[in-house]
Image: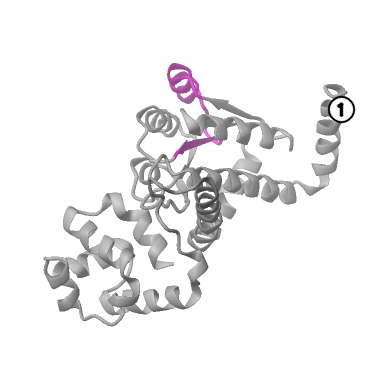
Amino acid sequence: MIIAKLHNVYKSLTVTEQKIASYIIKNPEKVISMSITALAKECASAPSAVNRMCNSVGVDGFSKLKIELAGAIAKSSAGEKLPAIGETSDPKTIFANVFNSGRQTLKNTMEMLDFESIEKIAEKIANAPRTLIFGVGTSSVIAQDAAYRFSQLGIEAYAYSDILQMNVMAMNMKKGEVAIGISHSGSTKAVVEAMHHAKDVGAETVALSSFSESILCKDSDYAVTVYSDEENYPIEAVSARIAHMCVIDAFMMTLASMKHSNFKEHISIRNKALKEIRY
């Protein structure tokens, strides 16, 4: 989906390209009937800048961007448009908007995923002797959840959020092991550095972020990127965090299908452990 792509690469665009992208995001119906010269004039830029922006998004020229835009508009419905939250918004409206944002984020993320890459990542994790997962702040919760879920399948997985410990553990990884770095922005220094250390010693590196052009994604062997609706919900993109968790859940089920012969045994062990801690 072209709108999702524009959101995804927005932070990596130049100031001029961002201005053009913002106009397209806010006026998709209008843009499909505009010439490249008209759009450039509307954004106080040049046609060459519009073409550069298209290339930055991974689209070969303005004509193809309009075709993708028209397709996206045809797929969308009025109910999927997310009004911004204002100062006078009542709780019901806020809840509805946030819930709709989460739903739309998952839909857009699904359209963006590279399943050939995801299959390779799943194979790496399934065959790795150990998987280390790094995340700080809100991403640390997702990292802990990932380690717990993978461990249920008999996969040796550990999560780290302490900055010093992350670096130490990353430096002691071995070839064939997998390091997963989770960061909404993809520019969290501690996570990026830990992943660099892991890669330096030969570990396979996997990024989970909301921005494909981030340092974390660019410097990792593999990257999974979710859609982030920062235009309507700029506060650490709550909906993006939901998408990160769903990606982890989907990876767990993918790994479970790959380890199907042992899945029931591991789940039985998990259920027994849970039963012992409950009344």
Whole-percent x and y of residue 60?
30, 73
* Residue 133 placement: quadrant: top right
Question: Which residue is labeled 1 in the image?
Answer: 275
Q: Amino acid at mark 1?
A: Lys
* Residue 186 placement: quadrant: top left
Residue 168 in view here: yes
Circle 1 residues within 10 Å: few <14, some 14–19, many ≥20: few
Image quadrant in which the N terminus is located:
bottom left
Q: Is residue 136 above or below residue 162?
A: below
Whole-percent x and y of residue 17?
21, 59
**Residue drawn at 37 percent across, 29 percent down:** 193
Whole-percent x and y of residue 210?
43, 47
Residue 86: in magenta span? no
Horizontal side of residue 200 vs 41, given as left or right: right
Horizontal side of residue 73 vs 34, given as left or right: right
Horizontal side of residue 48 vs 65, given as left or right: left
Q: Which stretch appears magenta?
A: 161-183
Residue 168: in magenta span? yes
Q: Is residue 46 above or below residue 117?
A: below
**Residue drawn at 20 percent across, 68 percent down:** 50
Q: In the depicted view, which residue is nearer to us: 181 or 104?
A: 104
Q: Is residue 242 above or below residue 7?
A: above
Q: In the depicted view, which residue is nearer to us: 40 or 54?
A: 40
Image quadrant in which the C terminus is located:
top right
Q: Is residue 243 above or below residue 2?
A: above
Give the total of numbered labels. 1
**Residue drawn at 43 percent across, 33 percent down:** 195
**Residue drawn at 41 percent across, 61 percent down:** 4
Whole-percent x and y of residue 76?
49, 71
- Say what secondary structure mark 1 lies in: helix
Horizontal side of residue 232 vs 144, given as left or right: left
Residue 177 in view here: no
